[in-house]
Image (cartoon, rainbow, N blue to C red):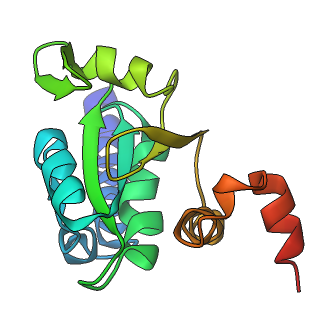
Amino acid sequence: MLWNYRLPLLRRWSLILALSVLGYASAGPKPSAAQSIKWRSFDTALAVADSTDRWILVDVYAPWCGWCYKMKRETYPSVLTGTDLPFVLTRINRDDSDTTHRYRGRRLSSRQLAKALGAEGVPAVVILDAAGKRVMTVSGFVSPDLLVRILAYIHTEAYHHMSFDAFAASRVE
């Protein structure tokens, strides 16, 4: 008698779980939006930036980081579109100790590189100039609006003569 009572309950919970998973999988932007961004390896990004005189945007992430996935799905696709971006895009996994990169005459693991770029936590956005010198590091989740302001700050080269806060305050309409 107890078995017959539980079976429909288990089926109900299985159905609820299945519907929840389907609903979650179909929510949010489609993967193609995030996949259309041209992410390069770090070493390639340095070479391309140097040869084309562009800045480098480094997305520092970790596989377990929910905010990192949110930025990859929502922030980057809504801001980093088009083929004529003045930024070369690259990503590094802050938890990866096996992959190595050449940076400023040294061979560093992704973990060591993230630390050298000032990314103590994840997510983080690091901006490098064409020569690979760090210009700015922003830790924590970056909304699309904030990323637009950061990129404008860099692209207008305001970072040479004013703080980001002063730049952002001067752009308030």
Locate residue 168: give its quadrant: bottom right
Can residue 34 be seen here? The reply is yes
Residue 134 image offset from top left, x and y in percent: 46, 38
Q: In this view, does 162 lie to the left or right of 170?
A: left
Above or below — where is 162 with respect to 149?
above
State the residue at coordinates (37%, 63%): 73
Residue 78 image offset from top left, x and y in percent: 44, 77
Above or below — where is 116 with respect to 40?
above
Q: Is residue 52 left or right of residue 142?
A: left
Q: Which of 156 and 126 is in front in this view?
A: 156
Residue 67 image offset from top left, x and y in percent: 49, 44
Q: Nearer the viewer, residue 5 or 15?
A: 15
Image quadrant holding the C terminus, namely bottom right
State the residue at coordinates (32%, 45%): 131
Residue 142 image offset from top left, x and y in percent: 58, 54
Q: Which of 33 and 56 is in front in this view?
A: 56
State the residue at coordinates (36%, 68%): 23
Above or below — where is 72 with respect to 170?
above
Q: Is residue 79 left or right of residue 98?
A: right
State the residue at coordinates (15%, 26%): 102
Can residue 124 be seen here? The reply is no
Image quadrant holding the N terminus, namely top left
